[in-house]
Image (cartoon, grey):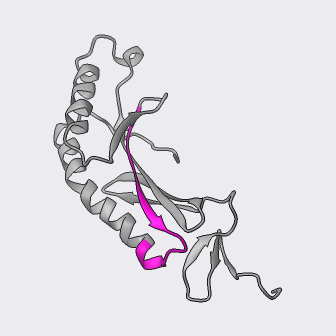
Amino acid sequence: MPLGRLPLLGPFAVHPDGRLTPRDADTSPCFTVRWRGRLVRARLVQTGPGGGRLAMRAILGRVPSSAAHGEDAARPRSFALLRALAGSLPESWRVGLTPDHRALLQTEVQLPLPVTAADLITAATVFLLTLGPYLDFLDEDRILPRGHERML
């Protein structure tokens, strides 16, 4: 390895103290996990010198299509459920809907860069643990089928 260059570990540059940054400005390292049967994606984005954010998204389920269900009550109930959910979320969390009817929850956490692996995993874990009760709420209603999720 040439002198003056940081060693690389996958999409990360590893600093001498073990802290991580994306290896270049065009790289946004990400990872996915399944949490309580749902796909969750975390992506580290460098926002400037010394700053970054961890963008996290969780697929909540799929809103029934009007074409597939006609006047079925499940679709309006799904939207009512998502509105109720949106009103109870932490301030920085948002509910969204993709063009293919997937409901998702998204948020971002500011992180200093370079970041330790422990801080990166801690931020993702706090998101997952906070997300749990909301997923329980959705699972009780069973309006949003999980379906087959693709990567975000």
Q: Residue furthest front?
A: 49
Most foreground residue, 16 or 59: 16
Instruction: Give the percent coordinates (x, y) of residue 38.
Output: 36, 51
Q: Residue furthest right?
A: 2
Most foreground residue, 44 or 37: 44
The residue segment tinted magenta is 102-119
Q: At 34% from the left edge and 41% from the top edge, which residue is drawn?
A: 94
Please give left or right for residue 52 compared with residue 146 in the image.
right
Instruction: Give the percent coordinates (x, y) of residue 79.
Output: 27, 26
Instruction: Give the percent coordinates (x, y) of residue 138.
Output: 22, 42
For the N terminus, the quadrant is bottom right
Compared with 16, 34 (above or below) is above
Q: Residue furthest top?
A: 71
Q: At 34% from the left edge and 17% from the top edge, which residue is drawn?
A: 69
Let me know if residue 108 is in the magenta part: yes
Q: At 19% from the left edge and 53% from the top edge, which residue is drawn?
A: 133
Q: Disc count in the image?
A: 0
Please give left or right for residue 120 compared with residue 26 in the image.
left
Instruction: Give the percent coordinates (x, y) of residue 139.
Output: 22, 44
Let me know if residue 29 is in the magenta part: no
Please give left or right for residue 94 compared with residue 120 in the image.
left
Please give left or right for residue 122 compared with residue 91 in the image.
right
Most foreground residue, 139 or 120: 120
Compared with 103, 106 (above or below) is below
Specify the quadrant of the image occupied by residue 110: bottom left
Q: At 41% from the left edge and 74% from the top edge, which residue is drawn?
A: 119
Taken as a whole, is the magenta stretch helix, strand or loop? strand
